[in-house]
Image (spheres, rainbow, N blue to C red):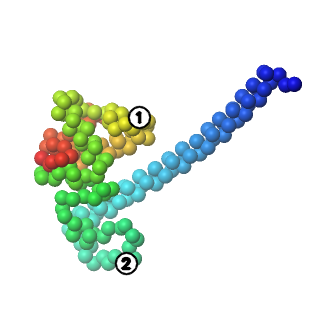
Amino acid sequence: MPSVVGLLEQHELAARRRVDGLREEADRIQAELAMAEQEWSEWTIARERVGAVLSAPGNDSAGVVATDMPEGVVTEAEVQASPPLVVKAKSQVPMWREGLAGTALSVDYQRILAALEDRIRLGQGPLTCQELAAAFGMDVVPAKVEGLRSKAKRLVSRGWLAEPAPGRFTLARSVSGPGGGS
C-alpha cells in the first residue's frame, strides 16, 4: 500500500506539470497577442497617415479610380459625401472645432469625455488612465491602461482633452463633453 506522503507527492508533481504547461501556453498566447497588437497598431498608423495625406490641402486625387475595393473600404468620394459633423465608429478622431459635438466620436471616446466631464462637474482634478480604467470597471492591467492612454493621447492631439501634467487628463477648456460641442 502506498504511503500518504507518496500519494501527495504524486498529486503535487502532476499539479506542478499542469501549471508549467499552462504557463508555457500563456507565454505563447501573450507573445502572439503582442504581435497582433503591434500589427493592429501599424495598420492604424497607416490608415491615419493615408487619411492625413488625402485630407491635405491641395491634394488632387480626382484622377484616382477605385477598382475592386475590398468590402468595408471607404473611398475619398464617400468621405466627402458624408455629413461633416458625423464620424462613424472606429474612424479617426476628428480635430475639435467650434460646434463639433462629442457625439461625433466613437463610444469609447465618448465614455472618456463623459468621465472627465463628471470630474469637472464634481470639482475634482484630472484623471490618470489607471483611474479611468477603474471607473470603467476594467481590469487595471498594463494592456487596458495603455489602450486608454492611447485614446486619451489621441484626444489631446486632436484638441478634445488637455494634459496639464504628464499622464493626467482633463477636458480642454473649449470642450464641454460628449453631449455638446463648445
Tell me the quarter of the picture where residue 11 sits. Answer: top right
In the image, 179 versus 155, the foreground residue is 179
Circle 2 packing at 10 Å, graded few (<14), some (14-19), many (20+), is few
Residue 57 location in percent, x, y? 20, 64
The kind of residue tagged 2 is Thr
Q: Are marks 2 and 1 in contact (CB under 8 Å)?
A: no
Can you tell which of label 2 and label 1 is closer to the viewer? 1
User: Outermost residue, front direction?
Assistant: 1
Side of 115 where 9 appears, left or right: right
Q: Residue at x 36, y 34 (%)?
A: 134
Q: Residue at x 78, y 21 (%)?
A: 5
Rendered position, 175 above or below 82: above
- Res 5 visible: yes
In the image, 74 versus 15, the foreground residue is 15
Q: Quadrant of the N terminus?
A: top right
Element on which disc 2 rests:
loop
Rendered position, 145 above or below 51: above
Element on which disc 1 rests:
loop
> In the drawing, what numbered circle is on residue 72?
none
Q: Residue at x 12, y 51 (%)?
A: 98
The kind of residue tagged 1 is Val
In the picture of the structure, the residue carrying the numbered disc 2 is: 67
In the image, 67 versus 90, the foreground residue is 90
Circle 1 packing at 10 Å, graded few (<14), some (14-19), many (20+), is some
Disc 2 to disc 1, C-alpha distance: 45 Å
Residue 58 location in percent, x, y? 20, 68
- Res 154 visible: no
In the picture of the structure, the residue carrying the numbered disc 1 is: 140
Residue 150 location in percent, x, y? 34, 44
Side of 93 where 182 appears, left or right: left
